[in-house]
Amino acid sequence: MKRSRVNDILREGAGFIRSFGYALPPFADWTPDDMKARRAEIGGIVDARLGWDITDYGVGDFPNKGLFLFTVRNGDAAALKEGRGMLYAEKIMISRRDQISPMHRHVVKAEDIINRGGGTLCIQLYASEADGTIDRKAPVSVPTDGIVRHFDAGGILRLSPGESVTLLPGVWHEFWGEGSDVLIGEVSTVNDDLTDNIFAEPIDRFSEIEEDEEPYRLLVSDYPKWLGA
């Protein structure tokens, strides 16, 4: 993705998020220079990979295959092994109308996906085979706001604003907005986007950035290069 396109998406997305009354943390507005100047005190942000995240999954077609995210909080994977401490994470995301976030599952992360406003959030669901691949025959069951719902393999769950679903590790899912763009909340166990996304097709979680202009805000994938993370 070109940095100029990333910058435009950031500006548009931040406005969309705030239009629903969702207040982002102060560091969401920090420039790259702000983050560099405060590097000594923002280890908690950098190490937990909090902040902006835009991906086209390396496909180069963001309007049709992509996702806009901001990680608000995130615990430490080591805490999960100990069973105590900050074991949770939170994201706010935007799924554009008909924009696919491709089929994937998680090994560790359990997540609640919440429609925070906008259009209908559509989620296609599959169970896993014993080897972790997609089971294209078995039914799949998921809790939605305390009520378990059952779907045939490949069934589509539709969530209206305010509705949510719990996706446990191993549940394959692909999602998109229907009718209009959707603001999505995610509450989960500790998030590790570097290792805990298993995709059904050979795609990348993070995009290569072509630096055609200066960054408006840093993405979490920029931290190693720009902040020495």
Image (spheres, grey):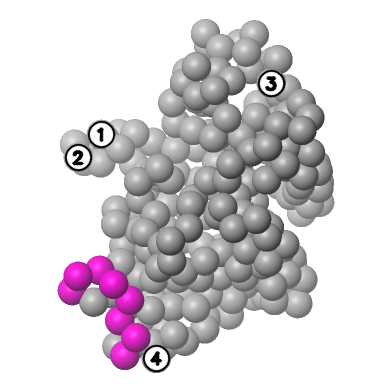
User: Callout 1 environment at 10 Å: few (<14), some (14 to 19), or many (20+)?
Assistant: few
Q: Nearer the viewer, mark 3 or mark 2?
A: 3
Measure how far apart labels 1 and 2 are at the Cα level. 5 Å
- Front one among 165 and 156: 156
Q: Nearer the viewer, residue 128 or 26?
A: 128
Q: Position of residue 141 (x, y in %)?
A: 35, 81
- Residue 211 location (% of width, % of height): 71, 32
Q: Amino acid at mark 4?
A: Asp
The residue wearing badge 3 is 32
Indicate left or right for 160 with 71 as reference.
Answer: right
Label 3 element class = helix
- The amino acid sitting under disc 3 is Pro
C-alpha span from label 4 to label 1: 36 Å
Mark 1 touches mark 2? (CB < 8 Å) = yes
Structural distance between the alpha carbons of marks 1 and 3: 29 Å
Q: Main secondary structure of the magenta part?
A: loop
Mark 4 and 3 residues: CB-CB less than 8 Å, in contact? no
Q: Is mark 2 in CB contact (under 8 Å) with mark 4?
A: no
Disc 4 element: loop
Residue with the mark numbered 2? 81
* 40 part of magenta stretch: no
Q: Disc 4 marks which residue?
A: 152
Picture residue at 63% right of the left edge, 46% below the top:
54
Q: CA distance from mark 2 to mark 4?
A: 34 Å
Secondary structure of the residue carrying numbered label 2: helix
Which residue is depicted at the point 39% across and 36% down?
Answer: 75
**Nearer mark to the viewer, of 1 and 3:** 3
Range covered by the magenta-colored residues: 130-137
Residue 18 visible at all: no
